[in-house]
Image (tube, coloured by chain):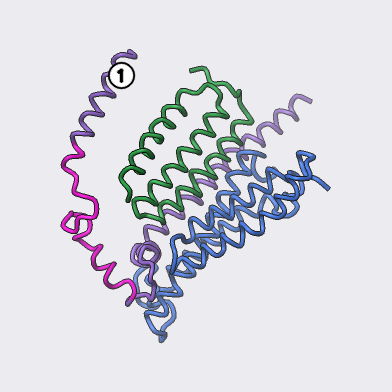
Amino acid sequence: MRILGFVLIVVLGVVLVWGIGDLPERGDPQAPAPTHVASYYIENALDDSNTPNFVTAVLADYRAYDTFGEAVVVVTAALACLLILLRRREDEVEVEEESR
Amino acid sequence: MTGRFESVFLDVVTRAMVPLIQVFAFYIITHGHYSPGGGFQGGVMLAASIILLRIALGEESYRRFPREAGIWIAGVATLLFTLLGFVSILFGGNFLEYAYVVPGMDAVELRYWGIFFAEVFIGFLVWGALVAIYDALVTGGVEA
Amino acid sequence: MILELDFWLMIVLIMFAILALEVKDLLAAVGVLTGYSFLIALLFSALGAPDVALTEAALGAALTGVLLLASLTFMNRNSKD
């Protein structure tokens, strides 16, 4: 089983390294990622929202809905943590009362 | 008056460092327009400062920053962020389209301040949520 | 981007990752994982993404380590495998 896992990892690593060859060069302006909407953000972020750091402008203005969802996920995680652990604490209290 | 570990050095260094960490975190939150950073990173730093207080000072930190405060801060910040989104719907824009939040003001200025308030809300939200997660893990959450 | 610096950062990064898996003491594993996050933050800033680097340094190097340490106080310190 250990040898099988090792062989799988090696095969996966070879495939991934082989796939690196097809990635575009770093900073290539003709790559698919910067040709779609990124150039619009880079050119117009300062005029649209008076924000020199266009990463902030993309995160909090153009893609504010994504950021909102991200923030709600964090709050939901905190609420879930509180709910699960609070429930366990009440159970412990009940067990203590029953054992008396 | 020393904290949990009976160590004067830990106590003094914590009390000296926490205000500096918090000031730097607020700088990161509010300076997101011009430098790397923003609400998320600054909020994590604020949460880290509170967790440092929790670890080093123990019981005293729960008097300074109560257990319930974390989830309250997170909830109120989420509510305000959502309201900011719905106000722009009210005046004819899309959800969280800051140019419509206050009718009659300049759109560029509105988007600038919209980004600012969004960052502040995200910062407070992450701060409260992460402190609440730490308290839930360590003490079992709000006292039942 | 300095190619040699990136190369050695990557090598040390892989060493840290293997070490974090292999080390028996869980406290040491948390420490190594924190160092791993810090190295990733350095690599992000070397690649020209200071925002991501700041997030990684704050979340990965500070808060994840603290949360893992907090959960470590509830359990046995030595790992079985």
Q: Position of residue A88 (x, y in %)?
A: 62, 34
Q: Colour of chain C?
A: green
Seen at 63% across and 44% down, the residue is B135
Residue B13 coordinates in the image, percent (x, y): 71, 50
State left or right for residue C74 relative to residue B110. right
Q: Which residue is mark 1?
A: A6
* Occupied quadrant, residue A19: top left
Residue A15 lies within the magenta run: no
The image quadrant where one finds the C terminus of chain B is top right
Q: Is residue C7 above or below residue B43?
A: above
Q: Magenta segment range? A: A19-46
Residue lying furthest bottom: B104
Residue occupying the point 47% across, 29% down: C20
Q: How many marks?
A: 1
Where C22 falls versus C72 (above or below)? above
* Viewer-closest of A89 and B31: B31
Q: Is residue C38 above or below residue B28?
A: above
Residue B44 is left or right of residue A51, and the answer is right
Q: In the rendered view, does C23 fall on the left or right side of A62? A: right
Chain A drawn in what color? purple
